[in-house]
Image (spheres, coloured by chain):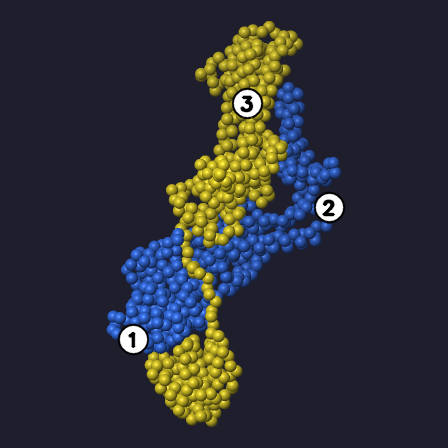
Chain colours: A blue, B yellow
């Protein structure tokens, strides 16, 4: 059984390439307001693991339909011979420059392709289309008409009346705004054209649905990983001199930290666009402001990088050992008080002498030093802001058709003053997740929390309706 | 093997045996990093092909990854994994040998008997029971999950300190002595490069514990062997002595408690009260008389060393090994690039994009000609209504009179649904018109200029001859009302007409402004 092929044909500049770009999810298709952009047929096979289920063919528009039809009428013998006459037309003129566009677009049709005839439903019906529709009827191929809407006006009803006389199926389909479900609906409609096409097209629809779910899960993971990285981001600078002026350093570090966060967000958004095969989008969005007054912490560090808490424990342990020795020497009469006192003394001494120890040098090498660190941000709303921006971006990208112009402008609301549109249960679960991310030191626990966060984000993405699409 | 190159031989070796997990972990990181630079489509094709072959392993991610590595890994890159495993095994062997030696030496020291005084059971219990139990407790503390330790004040810091004191850290010294390639491979395995420290943290942690427990098991094996050796090949006498105020009855309660695990099947290994009473000795009394009962202490001591020394360490060794394997598996799954790899392997690859690159538009070769501005007032005006604009003849005449101040002689229909003969008839009539005739072709601004119209304009020019103006006038309609054509539409029409190369062909839209 041969797989179905659909040639997208019609008048120039009526959105044929846009429809192909939308159905093929390919933003490399050239779509411009200028007519005559497509000069050669281009095939878009839908493959699953290498097996082609159906093929779309983008074609150039009719240019000399009346002349072509006149030639065919001249060579017509009977109605039953019309498909052969069309074939003869193509073979006669294939290598001449008289009908290059007609030969190019009729080629797939004489090879058995189904017809998808595209018109612009925002413009008046015109008598000049009748020659084209007559030619298509002569091919004898199963055909469907798609009423695209490029402008704002609505002449769909007028077009439907005219097209119903020529085509088996007539559908309205806006290449710029059709969401994913609409595209699947159209593929299901293709299956009505010929019975033998039903099975591959249904298989194609099922695979596209599964693929869609997979992309959404990928996008959820990309968003989760972005949030984890941004929550854990920090910048540290060791201080050359323990008493140096911190203010200029704070400013520099602050800029570096914020720049890293913004770049990480950009990378995350780029990844989401790539997941949905939007390679040409030029995104313009307002960068978020990191509002956190307590970004800085000055910390001391020692030779093995132990923090104050770790040193206190070490001091306590050594104190306990010493105190325990005393207890043993007293033959148990001290009731382990020595050990207890040792713990307190050891821990306390470390606590109070921590800073001084940090300044000690041994053999010319500093045992300790000071470092200035900025981040990770402790603002509890920060991850929700990042998530909110990511959800808005995802919503605009996921259902964005590949026919749209490449510029994407996103206006993120000021999320610090407006609450995130999340369900209460989601917000709580997210809050717990973010807290665990902030606390976890080991990767394994971070990875597990990232997995949980991915599932939460995926659940949210499933439930969110797409934001209103921008007019092209 | 003569005649077989190294790469082929290597691949045969790899395919015949399954790699240890650690080798897979190292090679996976190397291979996914290398893959990041390859073409995404080629990568998808390759991995999905492998995935289809591995359909029988669906759900077994680690096996899938192992098979994938064998299929795509270059022999050079796969060596790192094997080197890391060999290095790990060498370090383990050295620690085991060290442990055996230290255990043996400890046994010889603690069980030393020169005839001046008996071997003190209290020493043996302190070194081979109390100390191992204390260290076991520290081991448990060191391995407890971080989330649990956070609940106890100070416990986190203590755990960090204990990790610093982990005997497995001796590996750092041993690793320094390894050949460079093995050292690098091992460092890759435990992710000591900063970039992967967080990913491999758990692997490193449990690798250290695994080494330390290998040492501990070997230590206890060595000490047990030493004990058995001395018991078998020398004549030992045992007694018990302590400065603490402990009488025979209290000491027996301690030995009874320690004997509880084996009392049901090895009663000889539990000291009797008489044995305990008789074998107590004090240093100031000099060498006590050695009773037969003093020798039978060895069974109890051997059982204690086995039960409280070796057996727990078998358990901790097994636990650390299990945790290490789990850590490696987790790290494998979470290695950057692996989730995406597993997705490519396990899910259908759906492609919808074009087979070939889009060719650039040919664009007609522009035959631009400088158009002369035309004054239509006073001329014989003939209008061609191209493709049936939605105005009747009378409306067209009024329109042109109102907006351009010209009088139309005749309106003719062409294009659209008209036959070609009709177009030719219009051309012939215009050719016959007086010399001062100007032809205005009304077109729909929103429709693109087609070659059908261009052919008509070319034929019209040929028939009318040079000099007589032809004006193309795009008309726009909005909600069925006359409107100003958009600049985009006008530009499209202008560019197309320029390609006709007719200097007396102009574009003038109607109207310039709506009044």
- The subunit carrying tag 2 is A
What distance separates the C-alpha of mark 2 from that of mark 3?
Answer: 51 Å
Which residue does the image show at 69% across and 34% down from the upper left? A349
Give the residue number, with chain letter if any, for mark 2.
A241
Residue at label 3? B220
Q: Tell whether A239 sits left or right of B476.
A: right
Q: Position of residue B226 (x, y in %)?
A: 56, 18
Residue B246 visible in the picture: no
**Place of residue B364 in the rendered image (x, y in percent of width and height, measured from the top left):** 47, 74
Q: CA distance from mark 2 to mark 1?
A: 96 Å
The answer to which quarter of the image holds residue B109 is top right
**Around disc 1, counting alpha carbons within 10 Å, would you say few (fewer than 14), some (14 to 19), or many (20 or more)?**
some
Give x and y (percent) for residue A355.
70, 40
Q: Above or below — where is B384 with respect to A294?
A: below
Considering every residue shown, the one lying at the far right of the view is A364
Label 3 sits on a secondary structure element that is helix
Please tell me which residue is depicted at 57% across the width and 58% down the height of the picture.
Answer: A288
Residue A39 horizontal side relative to residue B316, left or right: left
Say which residue label 1 marks. A75
């Amino acid at each position: 059984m041969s797989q179905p092929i659909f040639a997208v044909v019609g008048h120039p500049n009526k959105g044929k390439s846009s429809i192909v770009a939308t159905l093929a999810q390919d933003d490399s298709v050239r779509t411009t307001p200028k007519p005559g952009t497509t000069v050669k047929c281009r095939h878009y096979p839908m493959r699953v693991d290498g097996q082609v289920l159906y093929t779309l063919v983008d074609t150039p528009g009719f240019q000399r339909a009346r002349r072509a039809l006149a030639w065919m009428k001249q060579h017509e013998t009977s109605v039953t011979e019309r498909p052969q006459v069309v074939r003869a037309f193509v073979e006669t003129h294939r290598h001449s420059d008289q009908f290059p566009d007609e030969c190019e677009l009729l080629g797939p049709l004489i090879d058995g392709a189904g017809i998808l005839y595209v018109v612009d439903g925002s413009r008046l019906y015109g008598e000049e289309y009748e020659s084209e529709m007559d030619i298509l009827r002569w091919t004898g191929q199963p055909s469907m008409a798609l009423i695209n809407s490029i402008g704002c006006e609505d002449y769909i009803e007028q077009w439907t009346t005219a097209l119903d006389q020529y085509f088996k199926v007539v559908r309205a389909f806006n290449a710029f705004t059709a969401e994913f479900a609409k595209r699947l609906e159209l593929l299901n409609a293709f299956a009505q054209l010929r019975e033998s096409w039903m099975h591959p097209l249904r298989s194609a629809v099922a695979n596209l649905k599964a693929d869609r779910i997979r992309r959404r899960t990928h996008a959820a993971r990309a968003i989760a990983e972005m949030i984890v990285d941004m929550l854990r981001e920090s910048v540290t600078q060791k201080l050359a001199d323990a008493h140096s002026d911190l203010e200029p350093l704070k400013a520099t570090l602050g800029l570096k930290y914020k720049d890293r966060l913004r770049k990480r967000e950009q990378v995350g958004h780029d990844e989401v666009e790539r997941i949905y095969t939007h390679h040409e989008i030029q995104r313009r969005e307002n960068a978020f402001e990191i509002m956190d007054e307590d970004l800085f912490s000055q910390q001391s560090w020692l030779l093995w990088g132990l923090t104050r808490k770790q040193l206190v424990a070490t001091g306590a342990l050594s104190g306990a050992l010493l105190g325990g020795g005393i207890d043993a020497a007293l033959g148990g009469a001290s009731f382990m008080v020595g050990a207890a006192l040792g713990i307190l003394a050891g821990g306390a001494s470390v606590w109070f002498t921590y800073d001084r120890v940090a300044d000690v040098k041994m053999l010319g090498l500093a045992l300790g030093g000071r470092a200035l660190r900025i981040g990770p941000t402790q603002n509890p709303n920060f991850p929700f802001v990042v998530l909110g921006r990511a959800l808005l971006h995802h919503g605009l990208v996921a259902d964005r058709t590949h026919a749209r112009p490449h510029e994407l402008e996103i206006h993120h609301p000021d999320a610090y003053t407006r609450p995130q549109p999340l369900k209460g249960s989601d917000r709580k679960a997210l809050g717990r997740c973010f807290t665990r991310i902030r606390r976890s030191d080991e990767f394994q626990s971070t990875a597990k929390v990232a997995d949980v966060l991915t599932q939460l984000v995926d659940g949210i993405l499933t439930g969110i309706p797409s934001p209103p699409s921008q007019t092209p | 093997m003569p005649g077989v190159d190294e790469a082929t031989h290597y691949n045969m070796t790899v395919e015949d045996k399954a790699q240890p997990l650690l080798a897979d972990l190292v090679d996976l990181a190397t291979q996914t990093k290398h893959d990041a630079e390859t073409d995404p489509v080629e990568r998808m094709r390759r991995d999905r092909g492998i995935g289809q072959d591995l359909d029988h392993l669906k759900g077994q991610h680690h096996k899938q990854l192992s098979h994938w590595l064998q299929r795509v890994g270059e022999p050079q890159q796969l060596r790192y994994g094997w080197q890391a495993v060999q290095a790990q095994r060498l370090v383990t062997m050295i620690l085991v040998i060290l442990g055996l030696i230290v255990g043996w030496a400890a046994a010889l020291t603690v069980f030393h008997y020169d005839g001046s005084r008996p071997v003190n059971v209290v020493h043996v219990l302190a070194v081979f029971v109390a100390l191992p139990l204390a260290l076991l407790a520290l081991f448990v503390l060191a391995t407890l999950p971080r989330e649990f330790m956070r609940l106890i004040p100070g416990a986190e810091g203590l755990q960090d300190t204990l990790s610093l004191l982990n005997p497995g850290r001796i590996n750092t010294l041993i690793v320094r002595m390894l050949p460079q390639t093995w050292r690098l491979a091992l460092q890759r395995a435990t992710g000591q490069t900063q970039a992967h420290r967080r990913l491999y943290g758990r692997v490193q942690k449990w690798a250290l514990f695994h080494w330390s427990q290998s040492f501990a098991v070997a230590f206890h094996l060595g000490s047990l062997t030493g004990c058995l050796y001395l018991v078998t090949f020398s004549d030992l006498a045992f007694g018990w002595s302590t400065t603490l105020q402990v009488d025979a009855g209290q000491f027996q309660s301690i030995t009874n408690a320690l004997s509880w695990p084996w009392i049901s099947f090895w009663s000889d290994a539990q000291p009797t009260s008489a044995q305990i009473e008789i074998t107590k000795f004090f240093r100031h009394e000099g060498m006590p008389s050695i009773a037969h009962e003093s020798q039978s202490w060895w069974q109890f001591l051997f059982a204690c060393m086995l039960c409280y020394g070796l057996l727990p360490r078998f358990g901790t060794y097994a636990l650390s090994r299990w945790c290490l394997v789990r850590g490696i598996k987790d790290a494998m799954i979470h290695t950057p690039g692996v989730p995406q790899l597993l997705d490519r392997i396990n899910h259908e690859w759906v492609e919808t994009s074009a087979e070939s690159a889009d060719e650039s538009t040919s664009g007609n070769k522009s035959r631009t000609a400088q158009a002369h501005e035309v004054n239509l007032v006073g001329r014989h005006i003939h209008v061609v209504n191209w493709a049936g604009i939605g105005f009747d003849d009378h409306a067209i005449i009024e329109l042109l009179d109102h907006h351009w101040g010209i009088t139309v002689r005749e309106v003719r229909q062409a294009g659209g649904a008209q036959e070609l003969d009709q177009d030719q008839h219009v051309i012939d009539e215009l050719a016959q018109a007086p010399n001062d005739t100007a032809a205005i072709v009304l077109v729909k601004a929103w429709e693109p200029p087609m070659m059908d119209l261009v052919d008509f304009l070319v034929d019209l020019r040929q028939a009318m001859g040079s000099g007589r103006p032809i004006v193309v006038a795009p008309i726009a309609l909005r909600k069925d009302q006359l409107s100003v054509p958009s600049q985009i539409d006008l530009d499209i029409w202008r560019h197309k007409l320029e390609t006709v190369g007719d200097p007396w062909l102009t574009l003038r839209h109607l109207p310039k402004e709506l009044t």
